[in-house]
Image: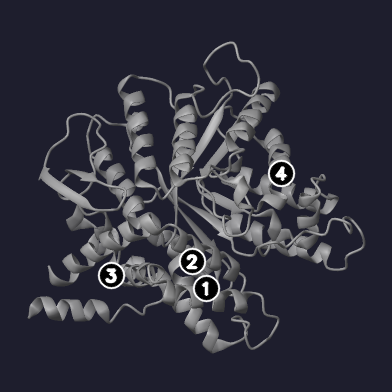
Amino acid sequence: MLKSQQSLRLLQHATKPPHLIFTHYRSLHTDRSHRTISTTTSTDQGAYASTPAVTPTLPTISQPSRPLSLLPLPVLLRSYALTALSSYPLLLSPSLRLLSFVAHSSSAILNPDRNPLLHYLLKTTFYTQYCAGETENEVQKTVKGLKGMGYKGVILAYGKEIVLEKGEKVDITSIRSADPTAEKDVQDWKAGTLKTVQMAENGDMIGLKFSGAGRDAMRQLAAEASPSESIEKATIEICDLAQARGVRLLFDAEQDAVQRGIDAWTLHFAQRYNRMTLGKAVVYGTYQAYLRSTPTTLARHLALAKREGFTLGVKLVRGAYMGCDPRTLFWGTKEETDKAYNGITEALLKKRWNGVLHPSIEEPSEKIDSEVAFVLASHNHDSVQKAMAIRKEQTENGEAKIDMVYGQLMGMADEVSCELVMAAKARGAVPFEKTEWAGPKAYKYIVWGSVGECLKYLIRRAEENRDAVVRAKGTRLALRTELGRRIWG
């Protein structure tokens, strides 16, 4: 009877605003989950099997038995509901079509920033799951809640972006021609990004999309032209502020039509800002492992970094544009993508060329001589475990390690994220493990902006959940197991 009353009281809080959830429930679901350090096994499908608690005497990569115990109950309930939705095409497909229709409509009635009912429906479901807030106050409370859970930092991004529809082309004939909206688009993008940097704290990261600077920026990127004077000045202002505040900038990958332009702009600014402290980076580029061309592209960029004497910031993702880019660009199977992702990760962490990442020119040795800073952005449990094993071995052997953090999207793969957080807490509790091995640094990628500004981002997140069928099933199983334990004891 007592347990039922407690569950009822928790459920009554499920509709609280997202920025209040973490603070309210942190004390309920944090302390009791860290009394022991347990060794568990886990599959990529998210099932966890625990063994009796042990007291470690050496740094290990043992996993907590209940990583999702970190999540507040309302977050757990919403995550389970939306993850379950992704496994039912009859429900998810019409939901995505409706979201896409709303996102591309010019009607004021279908604008969630002007229609209160639509705003409420989207904000309390998809938006709350994947986004940090619409105002600075909401964002700061969400960030505080995440760091209170144990995350080392956040990757904060302004949600405004342009996403091309499948088959849509960028008209490059009008590049640099008179466009009355171009300057306003750039200034709006700059203002939003500067505000994002100002909200971040020392050690945090900022996700930056050049497409947010408007259609004229997209035309310049598609034409692989240098950034216009307006975009150049705006980006320099953003980079200067980030550098002064100790914040790092992750220039996001986008669709293939503009990616080569994004790579060129990223390297342009990396050469300017990544020379200060070798091994550390202010500017990072994003590399998508599902593209066949990525190993070659990355090897070429590593060679440039070595030649020009700057640190190459690398954010490695699997990719999120399979639904709109030509299928011929990608590896033929998931296994090939996994091999590329894990092979690139191993090469960068060990700073040695391997069977996946080859040098772009003839190198005198197997060693990668470029300075690298690395963000492993993955929802794949196996990839995260492989990286942790390499870092553990390097620590035990007294080897130098590159600067590295782990990142997952807010609202997705919480079983992986919470596992990293709890592993870091467990390792940090061992007396002799001081600064040399404080455990993995887990970050959450969170987007902020109005519901309308974030709609295209929300569609991509929902699409990604639909495509990642195997992982979604594993996440759903882990969420259901924790939900059952929480409610029924």
271 lies above or below 250: above
Q: Amino acid at mark 1?
A: Leu
Residue 260 screen position, x and y as percent: 71, 44
Tell me whether the residue at label 2 lies in contact with that at label 1, contact meaning CB atoms closer than 8 angstroms. Answer: yes
Tag 4 or tag 1, which sits nearer the N-term?
A: 1
Of pointers 2 and 3, the one earlier in the residue sequence: 3
Camera-near label (3 vs 4) is 4
Q: What residue is shown with label 1?
A: 96
Q: Which residue is mark 4?
A: 260
Of the image marks 2 and 1, the number of the one nearer the N terminus: 1
Which residue sits at x=57%, y=51%?
Answer: 206
Label 2 to label 1: alpha-carbon separation: 7 Å
C-alpha gap between disc 3 and disc 1: 26 Å
Residue at 62 percent of width and 59 percent of height: 324
Tell me if 168 is positioned left or right of 152 in this view.
right
Q: Neighbour class for label 2 at 10 Å: few (<14), some, many (≥20)?
A: many
Q: Which residue is mark 3?
A: 73
